[in-house]
Amino acid sequence: MRCMGDVIRRMAWFIVVAIIVSYATYLAIGSTINAQAASIAGPVAIRDVLGPGAHHLSGMVMVPSSCYQLSEQTQTLSSAAFDLTFTTWQDPAIGCSGDQVPRQFHETLFAPATGVDFYATLDGANLPIEVIPVVPDTSSQ
């Protein structure tokens, strides 16, 4: 009987260790795949049309599927830093497809034309962005 107890105890330890190793592998591989997917997609290009004391930001953000909508909000971090907070939410009135789809956004904020930093998050995760400043041509007016 003692021999059977040892076998069961060793089997239980083996299962516990196997679960821990499996979960650690899942976490390591999952974060690696997520990082690779983010680097493949590259940063989100944001067009910044500069006006007198204003930034008119626009671009497109990918959402998980066609039934997801995008909302944006700008938060002032300091006089020279702003956080673009993107939030997705599922619209039950729209049918879902399995593929990611782009959603357009427009945001206006008031700040000096130069010396401003922009940061972005999508559903609480950092979102790499590239802000492309555009000075409107006023010579044709």
Image (spheres, rainbow, N blue to C red):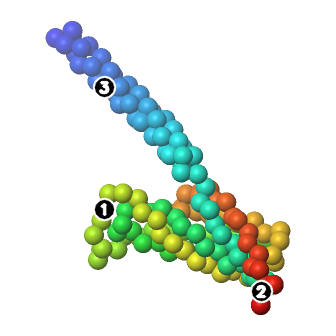
Q: Amino acid at mark 3?
A: Ile
In the image, taking residue 138 as reference, residue 28 lies left or right, namely: left
Q: Vertically, is 123 above or below 7? A: below
Give the number of the mark in front: 2 or 1: 2
Q: Where residue 113 appears, x then y in whole percent?
A: 81, 75
Quarter in which the C terminus is drawn:
bottom right
Query: Pointer 1: what residue?
Result: 97
In the image, taking residue 116 as reference, residue 123 lies left or right, namely: left
Q: Earlier in the sequence, mark 3 or mark 2?
A: 3
**Does the CB distance between marks 3 and 1 fall below 8 Å?**
no
Check disc 1: other Cα within 10 Å, few if <14, some if 14-19, many if 20+: few
In the image, taking residue 137 as reference, residue 58 lies left or right, namely: left
Residue occupying image coordinates x 81% and y 84%: 139
Q: Amino acid at mark 1?
A: Ser
Q: Is residue 62 visible?
A: yes
Q: Residue furthest front?
A: 140
Label annotation for residue 15: 3
Residue 66: image quadrant is bottom left
Quarter in which the N terminus is drawn:
top left
Q: Earlier in the sequence, mark 2 or mark 1?
A: 1
Residue occupying image coordinates x 27% and y 19%: 11
Query: Pointer 2: what residue?
Result: 140
Residue 57: image quadrant is bottom right
**Does the CB distance between marks 3 and 2 fall below 8 Å?**
no
Given residues 68 and 133, the one toward you in this image is 133
**Does the CB distance between marks 2 and 1 fall below 8 Å?**
no
Q: Vertically, is 46 above or below 31? A: below
Q: Amino acid at mark 2?
A: Ser
Give the number of the mark in front: 3 or 1: 1
At mark 2, the secondary structure is loop
Given residues 116 and 79, the one toward you in this image is 116
